[in-house]
Image (spheres, rainbow, N blue to C red):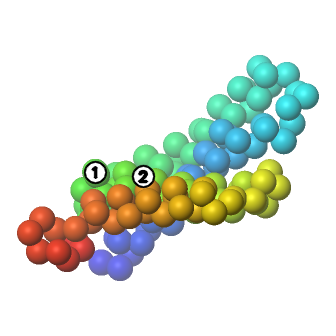
């Protein structure tokens, strides 16, 4: 049961690392041709899909689709915060963190069991 709960999370983490590089990695190389950035991003995104699809397929045995999406959004924000600071050298400011925190609260609400006040 523990593996069923955490393997999808690890796969989502890996897929988000690939997708963040696909979406934002080219910003460090703005002088390279746009078409090269597009092709490179598609190549990187293939690995993202190779992890995301199994994460959602396996995760659906334990989590609902909205829960998987909420979890994915929080993971995306954590990966992006690291990527922005480390790779792009653009640290996040207080307002970025505040906005991300509101998104995390929204994701947490998705896990509440209706009427009980407990998380699923």
Q: Position of residue 9 (x, y in %)?
A: 45, 65
Query: Which of the two labelled residues, at mark 2 and mark 1, occupies the earlier sequence position?
Result: 2
Can residue 12 be seen here? no
Secondary element at tag 1: helix
Q: Quadrant of residue 8?
A: bottom left
Q: Which residue was labeled with disc 2?
A: 54
Question: Residue extending furthest bottom?
Answer: 2
Task: Tell me the residue at 72%/54% (across/down).
Answer: 84
Q: Quadrant of residue 40?
A: top right
Q: Residues within 10 Å of mark 2 (few under 14, many from 20)?
A: some
Task: Tell me the residue at 63%/63% (across/down).
Answer: 94
Question: Is residue 113 depicted above or below 50 in this figure?
Answer: below
Q: Position of residue 35 (x, y in %)?
A: 77, 20
The residue nearer to you, when weighing 33 against 3, is 33
Can residue 2 be seen here? yes
Q: Residues within 10 Å of mark 1 (few under 14, many from 20)?
A: some
- In the rendered structure, are the residues bearing label 2 and label 1 in contact, judged by CB atoms less than 8 Å apart? no
Question: Is residue 33 depicted above or below 47 in this figure?
Answer: above
Question: Is residue 6 depicted above or below 80 in this figure?
Answer: below
Horizontally, residue 91 falls left or right of residue 3, namely right
Task: Tell me the residue at 52%/43% (across/down).
Answer: 49
Horizontally, residue 37 falls left or right of residue 30, namely left
Which mark's residue is nearer the viewer, 2 or 1? 1
Question: Residue extending furthest left?
Answer: 115
Q: Which residue was labeled with disc 1?
A: 65
Structural distance between the alpha carbons of marks 2 and 1: 13 Å
Question: Residue extending furthest front?
Answer: 95
The residue nearer to you, when weighing 88 against 23, is 88
Horizontally, residue 9 falls left or right of residue 61, namely right
Question: Is residue 44 depicted above or below 52 in this figure?
Answer: above
């Amino acid at each position: 049961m523990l593996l069923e709960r955490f393997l999808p999370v690890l796969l989502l983490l890996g897929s988000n690392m690939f997708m963040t590089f696909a979406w934002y990695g080219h910003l460090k190389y703005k002088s390279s041709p746009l078409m090269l950035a597009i092709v490179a991003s598609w190549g990187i995104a293939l690995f993202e899909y190779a992890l995301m699809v199994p994460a959602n397929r396996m995760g659906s045995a334990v989590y609902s689709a909205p829960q998987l999406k909420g979890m994915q959004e929080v993971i995306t924000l954590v990966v992006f915060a690291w990527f922005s600071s480390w790779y792009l050298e653009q640290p996040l400011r207080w307002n970025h963190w505040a906005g991300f925190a509101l998104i995390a609260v929204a994701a947490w609400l998705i896990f509440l069991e209706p009427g009980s006040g407990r998380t699923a």
